Amino acid sequence: MVEATLHFWSHIRRPYNGTTAMNRRHVKALQFAMTLPLIMAGTVRAADQPTPTGRFDLAQAQPAEDPAVRKRREEEQKRRQQQQPQQQQRPPQQQQPQQQRPAQQAPQQQQRPASQEGPRRERPSQPPQQQQVQPQVPKQFVPPPVRQAAPPLPPPVATPRAAPAPAPSAQPATPFIRPSSPEGQRAAPSTGGPSPFARSQGGSPPPVRLDQVQRSRETRIEAGGRRTVVQENNRFIIRQDNRVFVRHDEADRFRRLQNARTVSISGGGSQTFHTRPDGFRVITETDRNGGLVRRYRRGPDGREFNIIDNRRFWRNAAIGVGVGAVTAAIILNLRRPVVTIPRHAYIVDYARASDDDLYETLNAPPVENLDRAYSLEEVRYNLPLRERMRSIDLDDITFGSGDIDVSPDQHRKLERLARVIERVLRSNPDEVFLIEGHTDAVGDDVDNLSLSDRRAQSVAQILSEEFGVPPENLVTQGYGEQFLKIDSREPERLNRRVTVRRVTPLLGDQ
């Protein structure tokens, strides 16, 4: 009965705390009725009896303690009281802060009883303050070293593919689009500051005039009298089949650079290369007559990126018997394109156009679709093919009669053109720009071809050596008096001009 009463009593304490809606007065009466038998049976201590206010302290109500248990508890309390003075004299070291530990060592050693002292250790003869335990200093967090990301590798080189065959005449020709290199492959150099393509000391020959060039010429007859070749050091003027054109050594501009080197290769050709500031090596491969075979860049990892590749053209033309034997292979039977845009937007006047107009001209697609890709040699010697690209006439760059180089006071006029070319190269670093030289109709056609070709080369050298345009993105060609802007046989300043056009869309993987 007592156990059942205690069990019921523990359950009726929660209603007293107000967790139910039971009447408070009924709870008190029920608690008193259940507690009274316990008091009479001696299982509840006197401390659990009702208070003077008539309320029971149920939280302190405990069963009566057994006498044997109470005796053991009293003995245990006496024993603890005897040990308490010693504990007060020797507080545990683990309860004290580590910083105060050295200062309390001396008093503890003095209060320790002699019976508890063990064999004393010999202490060094240093002052006590030097033996104090230094407080532990938290270790400083040292961040792990940051690993630098490896520089991105240049994009892989696309495998050369054959040009698509021309479409049947019944269907319109599919426009050919030359694949361009991915952006970010190489940043175009800035025209601000010194040019990274400055010529080496002593690499710039002294200015020459036409009369000096004429005295250095050598003429020879080839192909049974059908071809005449006029040689001017590394430049050849060929007259054959009522046509006359000029060829020059494509590596000549690169040999002027500071770190340029030339090595011979099999077949009588050569490779001229120089290293750019970004670590890329530019290689220009020429045949034994100086004709451009291939121009490409080689990255620090050894991968190669073609800019101009004429190897297939030279193999198909079977060149090797003479410098002028290419005539039949490069002449194409093409019609002139139909131009539907205004003439001032098709042939832009450099002096009157804005920078945006120049950029639009050099970045515009062909005015007429192409049925295939062409080699650089085919682009050089076929006007209808070149006319598919818009052009810029540098009319404000003038040349005196017989002058070969651009005068120094006109160099600054080319800075704006260099900025526009740099802007185009940011989108595609493999763009190719053709710089054409033209003369008026006064004088001999051989002299005019030599003058125009040298003037175009002079403009290209200024763009690279003074304004930082990469020389590998430029090619030059002289046309003499063949394409007059003003139809006149008299001296005409507008006919003595330089023209710039982008020819990348005309080229393909050769």
Image: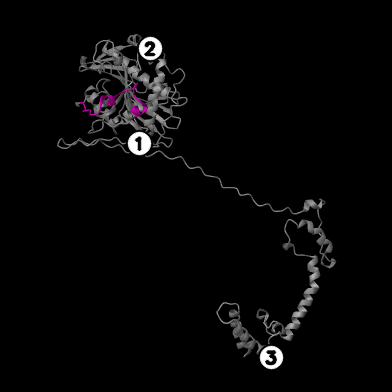
Which disc, if any, is residue 181? 1
- For the residue labelled by badge 2, is the local secondary structure a helix, a strand or a loop? loop
- Residue at the disc numbered 2: 208
Side (left or right) of 201 relative to 333: right
- For the residue labelled by badge 1, is the local secondary structure a helix, a strand or a loop? loop
Give the quadrant of residue 163. Answer: top left
Give the quadrant of residue 110. Answer: bottom right
- Residue at the disc numbered 3: 40
- Which label sits in the foreground, 3 or 1? 3
Above or below: residue 29 compared with residue 272: below
Could you say where residue 470 lies in the image, as x and y percent from the top left? 40, 27
Disc 3 from disc 1: Cα separation? 106 Å
Residue depicted at x 76% and y 83%: 71
Q: Nearer the viewer, residue 48 or 64?
A: 48
Q: Amino acid at mark 1?
A: Ser
Disc 2 from disc 1: Cα separation? 39 Å
Q: Earlier in the sequence, mark 2 or mark 3?
A: 3
Residue depicted at x 79% and y 74%: 81
Q: Which residues are magenta?
A: 336-359
- Residue 288 seen in this snapshot: no
Could you say where residue 146 lies in the image, as x and y percent from the top left? 53, 45
How many C-alpha atoms fall within 10 Å of the one at disc 2: few (<14), some, or many (≥20)? Answer: few
Disc 2 from disc 3: Cα separation? 139 Å
- For the residue labelled by badge 3, is the local secondary structure a helix, a strand or a loop? helix
Could you say where residue 465 lies in the image, as x and y percent from the top left? 42, 22
Could you say where residue 286 lies in the image, as x and y percent from the top left? 34, 25
Q: Does the stretch in magenta take in 353?
A: yes
Q: Earlier in the sequence, mark 2 or mark 1?
A: 1
Side (left or right) of 399 relative to 66: left
How many C-alpha atoms fall within 10 Å of the one at disc 1: few (<14), some, or many (≥20)? Answer: many
* Marks 3 & 1, CB-CB < 8 Å contact: no
Above or below: residue 38 compared with residue 466: below
